[in-house]
Amino acid sequence: MVREFVGFLKQYGVVGLAIAVIIGGKLNLLVTSLVNDLITPVILQPALKAAGVASIYELSYNGIMYGKVLGAGIDFIIVAWIVFIFAKKVMKEEVVAKR
């Protein structure tokens, strides 16, 4: 039974997937911190001051918190870019290894 389970884990790459999920979660935390603590205060501070808010997440219009959407959008773009670069590198290495 244990051998079957270990075989299942190896065959379907469950351990690799688990590692990828953990690293992806930590990458998301890193990027969120990067956006909240570095990009927003440094780059967007003049726009935030003009809007009269301290954080991008406080931006709203008639109760619609569009600042949260903007922050999530910035997070998504950065994470997608990092994943793209990583996938491109991995795919290049796989092509080289197949030759």
Image (cartoon, rainbow, N blue to C red):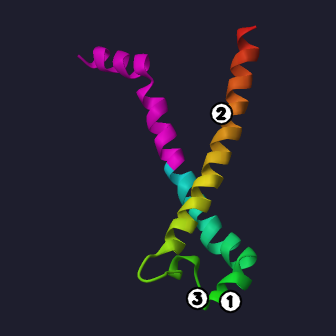
Chain-order first, disc 1 or disc 2: 1
Secondary element at tag 2: helix
Q: CA distance from mark 1 to mark 3?
A: 8 Å
| Residue matched to label 1 | 50
Residue 64's image quarter? bottom left
Residue at image coords 54%, 60%: 29
Q: Is residue 42 left or right of residue 15?
A: right
Residue 87, numbered label: 2
Q: Residue at 71% of width from left, 39% of height from top?
A: 85
Q: Residue 35: which quarter of the image?
A: bottom right
The residue mark sitting in front, 3 or 2, is 3
Outermost bottom residue: 52
Mark 3 Cα-neighbour bin, 10 Å: few <14, some 14–19, many ≥20: some
As for residue 4 lying within the magenta part, the answer is: yes
Labelled disc at residue 53: 3
Q: What type is the residue that disc 2 sits on?
A: Ala
Residue 30 appears in the figure: no
Compare residues 23 and 50 and report the one nearer the observer.
50
Pinpoint residue 19: horizontal percent, then vertical percent: 49, 38
Query: Dot 1: few (<14), some (14–19), or many (≥20) neighbours within 10 Å?
Result: few
Q: Residue furthest left?
A: 1
Find residue 6 and name its label: none
Q: Are marks 1 and 3 in contact (CB under 8 Å)?
A: no
Q: Where are the magenta residues, as a range?
A: 1-24
On the image, the x and y values in percent for residue 67 come to 54, 74
